[in-house]
Image: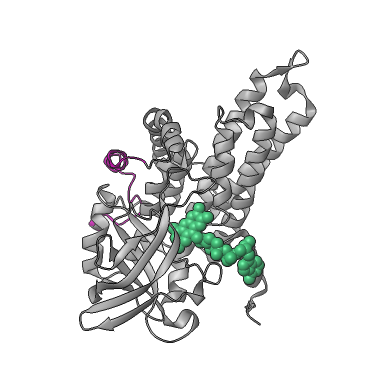
Amino acid sequence: MEFQLNEEQVMLKRMVHEVAEKEFRPKVTEWETKAEFMPREYFKKLSSLGLLGLSVPVEYGGQGRTAFEVILAIEELARVSILCALPVFESGVGPVRVIEQFGTEDQKRKYIPPVCQGESWCAVGMTEPEAGSALTDLSTRAVLNGNYYVVNGTKCFITGGGEADIYVTYVRLSEQKGAKGIGGLIIEKGAAGFSFGKQEQFMGWRGVPSCDLIFEDCRVPKENLVVREGDFRRLMTAFDLERCGNATMCLGIAQGALEQAIDYSQQRKQWGKDICEFQAVQFMLADALIKVEAARLLIYRATVNAATGLPSPLEANLAKCFANQMVRDVTALVLQIHGGYGYSKDYPVERMLRDGWGWGIAGGSIEIQKTTIASQLLNRRFDQRK
Ligand SMILES: Cc1cc2nc3c(=O)[nH]c(=O)nc-3n(C[C@H](O)[C@H](O)[C@H](O)COP(=O)(O)OP(=O)(O)OC[C@H]3O[C@@H](n4cnc5c(N)ncnc54)[C@H](O)[C@@H]3O)c2cc1C
């Protein structure tokens, strides 16, 4: 078993680290404070460095690299802010990979290259007001009428909502209940009958657009069907890759927070000594490092084993579930190490705590992940309805 990065991976990590520090660190506080999303020119910047669609095959405009390399890039960016990591996440492990795995050749050629070029942004619409954890209860309905699907329903909490250009949207394609009737359509911003709700005011993720998607007799060309009815379970396996990306957002935030604590605890003096000289502070630092390193190993295992394909569901769930809790714990420890200053907006750690918390809700809550892990461990299905 090899625990060292190879030369190319070291170079990638170093390059992304420098870009994150030079290009993004000076801007993120302003974007977060004004709740403004990153201007599109920064998507272009990420694209020019080959960071959009890192793991997408070259024929669709990507770099053809492994899931592990996407993870390395996401961690370095999320260390500074989730704002600059988000386009790399969406294009490397997010909904673009669903189009790549499930789409027709025409869909791949039409929709993926603009995302890799930083000209288009792809979001995913699953959650509905009455179907969150119980996703298979979703009721957004698509009815085929000649060459179009007519879509009616509402999605909520959609990251990228209002700003993204295309939405991989999960809909009920027939009257069949549960997972069986669900499929996915690519719906373009600007389609007749497609509008957006007001922007969410989340506690964290400031600057990340999020809103309802509202479909009222929205007409979608039938060739935009990307996930066929009955393929929902297979689709959830593609989602395991996104789970690794979600876990890595947590890792990046926690790593960034830990670095703040390393500096602060060696600068702040009380009782005439650096506060790192107090055992209680040392324990907090040690606990933070133990948790960060454990999460990193789980994420690395899941993504190295995935290579250019999909990760094992259990490995991805373990990584996400652990990292989701880890980032809450680590950012809380780091805030405590900063005392009153940690609680102030003058230091970045309160933002890191707010941003970190959301990942244990997005992409499936920690509790749902644990139920899935137990089900995989025991090889039994637990019907939540009975
Ligand atoms: C920051 C953020 C970004 C998001 N981005 C997107 C996006 O881009 N696209 C998208 O489609 N959705 C997105 N979501 C929505 C997210 O996927 C849902 O919020 C999530 O699946 C939980 O659904 P819910 O909010 O309806 O909570 P609920 O399902 O109502 O859950 C409420 C509580 O009950 C618990 N619970 C529910 N069922 C069970 C059970 N069977 N066993 C144990 N506990 C249970 C949950 O763990 C939770 O603690 C985002 C959410 C957030 C916060």
Q: Quadrant of the C terminus?
A: bottom right
Residue 305 in view of the camera: no
Where in the figure is residue 343, as x and y percent of width and height? Answer: 63, 32
Q: Is residue 241 above or below residue 357?
A: below
Residues shaded magenta: 38-59
Where in the figure is residue 100, as x and y percent of width and height? Answer: 32, 63
- Residue at point 33% right, 51% down? 163
Q: Is residue 324 left or right of residue 150?
A: right
Task: List the single residue furthest toward the top.
Answer: 272
Where in the figure is residue 279, as x and y percent of width and height? Answer: 79, 28
Task: List the single residue furthest toward the bottom.
Answer: 175
Residue 287 in view of the camera: yes
Residue 52 lies in the magenta stretch: yes
- Residue at point 75% right, 34% down? 283
Front position in the image: 362 or 203: 203
Quadrant position of ligand 1: bottom right
Residue 356 position by quadrant: top right
Q: Is residue 293 above or below residue 242?
A: above
Residue 98 lies in the magenta stretch: no
Counting the numbered discs, the total is 0
Report the coloring of the rendering: one colour
Front position in the image: 131 or 321: 131
Where in the figure is residue 98, as x and y percent of width and height? Answer: 37, 64
